[in-house]
Image: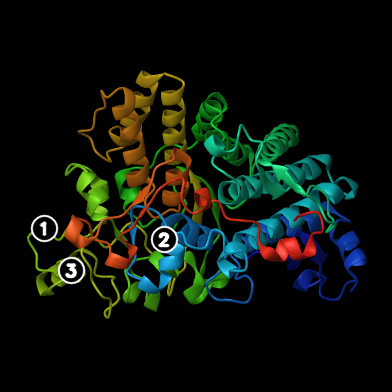
Amino acid sequence: MKFSFLKYIALSGALLLSACSSDFLETEPSDETGAATVFETTDNAKLAINGIARLMTNQHMGTQGFNGEGTIKMYYGNYPGNHFVVGLPGWSPIINGDYYDNVTSIYNYYPWYYYYKLIANANEIIHNIDGAEGPQEEIDYIKAQALTYRAYSYSMLAQLYGNRWDDSNNGSTKALVLRLEPTSESMPLSSLGDVYDQVYRDLDDALELFDLSGYQRQENFEIDASVAQAVYARAALNKQDYETAANYAAEAKASYPLMNVADYKAGFANPTSEWIWSSYGALDETLYFYSYFAYIAYNSTASAVRTTPKRISKELYDKIPASDIRRDLFLDPEGFDYNNNTGEAGDDLIENAYDRYPDLASNATIYAHMQFKVKANDQPGVGNLNHFRSSELYLIEAEANYFLENETAAANLLEELTASTGRDPEYTCTLTGTDLFNEIKKYRAIELWGEGFDWFDTKRWNDPIDRKSVSEGGNFISSLAVKVEPHEKNKWTWKTPQKEVDTNDMID
């Protein structure tokens, strides 16, 4: 399959529709008339929804490193976290959190540009779809998807450009421009609380419309009610609205059974029983060397993997029980030769790696603790990109129950996730209090490693980044073995990009 999609150009949330799809190549050239054509029928509007899905795996801003949602996961979730080892000293400003207040940096601007691009497209659909010709059920379903895209985008922006809820004075600190209309007019920054209120409203409206439509999605990249529920659960967790988080996590995961061991070891590149929402990725939609999989997949031929394979921190690896199958997804150096200072494997460890994973590139560099969790379907980095799995929802529900003082429920959820699925059949949890919370955090780190959660979780928990060098018992190179306290570096909050300030008269 291949998406039919419309290209969009956005700057600080402004939207210009252009007739760039083959379906619209010869239609009206002006933005105004082009928009009217797109929303003339529900069949056309479906292409606009596909366009947003496509934007999540498109290359952006004319530079190879920015590839939609994959970049958010890699540069903003994995790289600056506690448990993702990548030997790139030249990337220390990103990995060590030195750019939060650098308002002219492209790394400061990218998430703002990308998510407001999704929001701008969603706004066009939300405000035009009611006039489209077609069945009401299709109108409702298209609008529900657009509302969910907008809610998801604002929930992600809130985590990056907003304070932790703990630091927000109950949501009163300024965070984002809350654009709900297809306009580029200047607007002030809204409070973090107002942003979350709008996320909730959008999701409430989306869920009502999904119910009215009665439509069943055909593909995992499409959005349905379960996706809206999952977005709700994650947003509520970040807002410390634990009852809402627990309720929506339970609803979202209800129809997505946890995957078995065989599926778990299959490479995280294709939807399984527990994939709630993903982005489509196959050879006909490849980003070549710029995709998420070209940066992480162990079998990728891309130089980003062959020269610097992605690794788990030694500290986290050592916490994974020997009976847990997730330990097998990383290269255990115990009993083999390797350079203790760099992690580079000796001949016997290299041989062991190729014996276990013969699809490694023939010229790959092998390192202790390198990952075998993520695998590309095609070269150099093709795969479907997951955004929500039911495993995450189990962990959200467990964390929410802990704070709701339902500790037994939280422990049971950890056991259901870990023991009943065969991830670790020996696992039991009888912990309480702070020990139970630390257990939830540990299993989030193990279960979701490499999927873009590390930094976001650490920020939410108000924990420090604390990476250990080899001499300290870890496996980070010295320039990346740092400790960053939660109160440091603008409290890990990215400042409003200068590009937005320069074009928005209502932001100082």
Is the residue marked by circle 1 packed among few (<14), some (14-19), or many (20+) residues within 10 Å?
few
Which one is nearer the viewer's eye here, 137 or 422? Answer: 422
Q: Please tell me whether mark 2 sits on a helix, a strand or a loop.
A: loop
Look at label 2 and name its amino acid: Asn
Where is mark 1, residue-wise? 334
The earlier-in-sequence mark between 1 and 2 is 2
Q: Is residue 107 visible?
A: yes
Name the colouring of the figure: rainbow
Alpha-carbon distance for marks 3 and 2?
Answer: 20 Å
Type of residue at label 3?
Asn
432, above or below 253, in the image: above
User: Residue lying farthest bottom?
Assistant: 363
* Image quarter hosting the C terminus: bottom right
Label drawn at residue 96: 2
Q: Position of residue 208 (x, y in %)?
A: 73, 31
Q: Residue at x 41, y 18 (%)?
A: 406
Can residue 11 be seen?
no
Quadrant showing the N terminus: bottom right
Q: Front-most of 284 and 329?
A: 329
Which circle, 3 or 1, is nearer the viewer?
Answer: 3
Confirm or deny contact between disc 1 and disc 2 (CB under 8 A): no
Residue 443 appears left or right of 288: left
Q: Note whether 41 is above or below 138 in the view shown.
A: below
Q: Give the mark nearest the N terminus, 3 or 1.
A: 1
Q: Residue at x 55, y 51 (%)?
A: 493
Across and down, in percent, residue 303 comes to 38, 78
Residue 341 circle label: 3
